[in-house]
Amino acid sequence: MSSERSALALEDGSNGDAPASRRSSFSPTGASYGMMVVNLLKICVGTGVLAVPHAFATGGAVPCLGALSVLLVWNDWSARRLLACRDLLDEAGRARL
C-alpha cells in the first residue's frame, strides 16, 4: 500500500488525496471558525432530522414534547455559557477565532 501511495506522489509533494484547491484552503493549525460552525450545524440538524421522527413514533407525542422542551432549555443554557466564555476572551483571543 505504501508503494502505491509513493507512486501517487505529485510534483508539488502532495499525495493526491484531495484537489490542490481544497488542500490549500486548510490552515496548518486546524479548521477555520466557519468550518467549525458549519460542522456543528450539520451534526445538530442531521441528528435531529434522523432521530426526532423515530422518537415520536416510538415514544408518543407527550413524552417526546417533554424531552424536546428539556433539550430546548439545555441548548439555550449551553449557548449562553458559550457566549459568556466568548465575552471573557481578550482582544488577542478573539482575533485568533
Image (cartoon, rainbow, N blue to C red):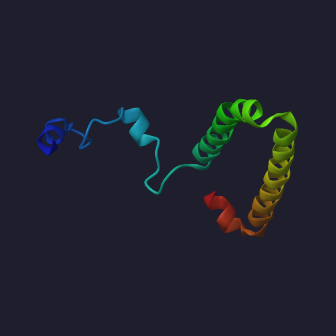
Count the marks. 0
Residue 48, picture quadrant: top right
Q: Nearer the viewer, residue 9 or 38?
A: 38
Q: Nearer the viewer, residue 91 or 69?
A: 69
What residue is at 85 percent from the left and 52 percent from the top?
Answer: 73
What residue is at 39 percent from the left and 40 percent from the top?
Answer: 23
Which part of the image, by quadrant, shows the N terminus? Answer: top left
Residue 37 placement (x, y as % from top left): 65, 45
Q: From the viewer's perspective, is 81 left or right of 45?
A: right
Residue 10, picture quadrant: top left
Which part of the image, by quadrant, shows the C terminus? Answer: bottom right
Q: Say if 28 sits above or below 49 in the image.
A: below
What residue is at 20 percent from the left and 38 percent from the top?
Answer: 11
Residue 95 placement (x, y as % from top left): 65, 60
Q: From the viewer's perspective, is 78 left or right of 69?
A: left
What residue is at 60 percent from the left and 47 percent from the top?
Answer: 36
Q: Say if 20 sits above or below 66 in the image.
A: above
Q: Say if 53 sits above or below 38 in the image.
A: above
Q: From the viewer's perspective, is 7 left or right of 56?
A: left
Residue 9, picture quadrant: top left
Most extreme residue toward the left is 3
Q: From the viewer's perspective, is 50 left or right of 23?
A: right
Residue 5 placement (x, y as % from top left): 18, 40
Q: Nearer the viewer, residue 57 or 21?
A: 57
Q: Nearer the viewer, residue 97 or 8?
A: 8
Residue 63 placement (x, y as % from top left): 84, 42
